[in-house]
Amino acid sequence: MNPGLHAEIAVRRGQFALDATVQVAPGEVVAVLGRNGSGKSTLLSAVAGLLRPDTARIVLDGRVLTDTADGVELPPHRRRIGLLAQQPLLFPHLSVLENVAFGPRSAGIPRPQARETALRRLAEVDAVEFAQRRPRRLSGGQAQRIALARALASDPDLLLLDEPLSAVDVELAPALRSLLQTVLAGRLALIVTHQVIDALMLANRVVVLDAGRVVEQGPTREVLTRPRSAFAARLAGLNLVSGTATADGLRAEDGTELSGLTESAATGTAAVAVFTPGAVAVYVDPPKGSPRNVIQDRIAVLEPNGTLVRVRGAGGLAADITPAAAVELGLHTGAGVWFVVKAAEVAVYLTNGASQ
Amino acid sequence: MTQTRDPHIVHTGLPRALWLPALMALGLILLPVLGLVVRAPWSRFFTLVTSESALAALELSLRTGAVSTLLCIVLGGPLAVVLARGSVPGLRLLRSVVLLPLVLPPVVGGLALLYLLGISGFAGYALDVAFGVRVPFTTTAVILAQTFVAMPFLVVSLEGALRTAGERYESIAATLGATPWTVFRRITVPLVLPGLGSGTVLSFARCLGEFGATIAFAGSLQGVTRTLPLEVYLQREVDADGAIALSLVLVAVAIVVIVVGRPRAVEGLQ
């Protein structure tokens, strides 16, 4: 038997095409990162059996759930896969306790034992006090916690989480996120999200999906600190310039020379230079003085980023500066600027041709 | 379900010219009923509505109406689920077919039933030969005629409720390990109960008011096929007062139906 999840899924719907392979090893939580329309939710629905893929092979703990080549397609209720959706979707006509006991009851467990299981699961999410309530008398955060208890109560082999925090109030999300962290530990789970913080806190491994394809995957920390694709860098809030490695840094595709900290001397091979927006200074006049990395650009977007202002260049680079500095420099959209970053702040590493 | 209007909100763009036709429309609905009430033989009312023929008609109407409504639920309910959730080709065409009794003149429906189940119809002939059963001009015929005309009301309101409820709860229930039958029993049915209720009330009202299909397919035999509307029509020939009194009984039933079922029925049909 091959434990864990192995899913190869291809779905084509009009303009959109998903073609991805995702694996989850035993005890591992994998985050699928991607923006809206990247195919994340389609992937989850196919794994849950709620959507029929064009071609697929999905194996969970050695059980073949879907195999289009052999005509195998297990219905959702026989997959032993739990789903926590964006909306809690608690059954409105049942009490909280009956909601959580629904899974065990469906498995044929007698009412008293099912209730016992439900109460235990409610205790796990710290919601026993709501047992007798109707779902409509719960807040969004409470309802989502109970939906989690309900998903766990049916004792699934794999838990799917589809943007579980996106519909929860901003101030309640952190508490729910750390609850998920506790509950998911040691479980097989696949979580779809477009928020890096979810991946960082919940997942051991990250799969980055863009336009229906896996563009990057690896341990969470590695993908988020050393992204090899522009998209993963954007998600992680990092600047990424791709090009070829030089002796002291990288030559960008447009010819700009960047110096930085190089990990090897494999000159001429594909590489990326990565640095944080906070390390980038913005000048309205050509900077003079010490040899630093200077990139001329034009401001495409000015947007708030926490207490700072994020300056986004037309070339894709981002810089974080204080609002006071932005006012002093008289920055506005379309203005020509020079982005400056110290060599010591730029990490250059090889991409092994993994992606562009 | 009543919505109170906030008097602070200024409604713009209601042309005054709409008021007159709107009032006329309202008058056309309300004044005839008022006419009945004014013209009613109140002194003899009780005697008229408790005459032997009136009571027989009332009893028959309630009995057949109840059975027909039950048939609508038992047969039309599953049909609504298939129409709302099924994925067979030609479902859109099927949906239009269900509306046929709604737009067809009832008397045409009655004739159609007669030529299907009458002694000269192919199904009627088969039934007669095989079992010696003749359907036309029996109470069974009344029930079939009423079920025929009332079915769309139940199917349409239930299908609307099923669509509004959506499939998301059902999907979640399936991921919790519930078989399709358990999902139907414990999730689908409870969620559409309001829609089913309003559909039931509307169907029952339509059954009680059925005239054309019944007289064409079942005739007018006292105690067997002569329902309340048929009795009203017959009484009009001999004793107008009796017809008015019985009409008022039907009006009263209609008002009860509207009060009980209307708000949800409107939701269900959306």
Image: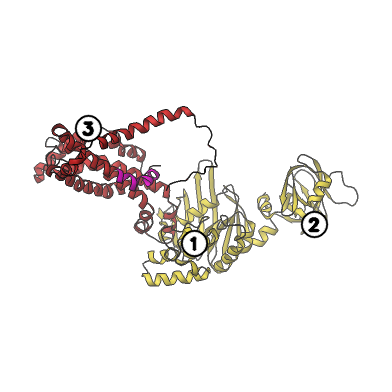
Chain colours: A yellow, B red
As drawn, is A311 to the left or to the right of B245? Answer: right
Q: Which residue corresponds to mark 2? A: A345
The part of the chain drawn in magenta is B255-268
Residue A108 magenta-drawn?
no
Q: Which residue is most to the top?
A: B17
**Marks 3 and 1, Cα distance to the nearest angstrom?**
53 Å
**Marks 3 and 2, Cα distance to the nearest angstrom?**
86 Å
Residue B257 magenta-drawn?
yes
In which quadrant of the rendered view does residue A297 lie? top right
The residue marked by circle 2 belongs to what chain?
Answer: A
Mark toward the start of the polypeptide (2 vs 1): 1
- The residue sitting at 46% across, 48% down in the picture is A54
The residue marked by circle 3 belongs to what chain?
Answer: B
Q: Are marks 3 and 2 in contact (CB under 8 Å)?
A: no
Say which of A13 and B9 sits in front. Answer: B9
> Is residue A45 placed above or below B27 in the rendered structure?
below
Say which of B156 and A229 sits in front. Answer: B156
Tell me residue A174's x, y (percent): 62, 62
Q: Which residue corresponds to mark 3? A: B108
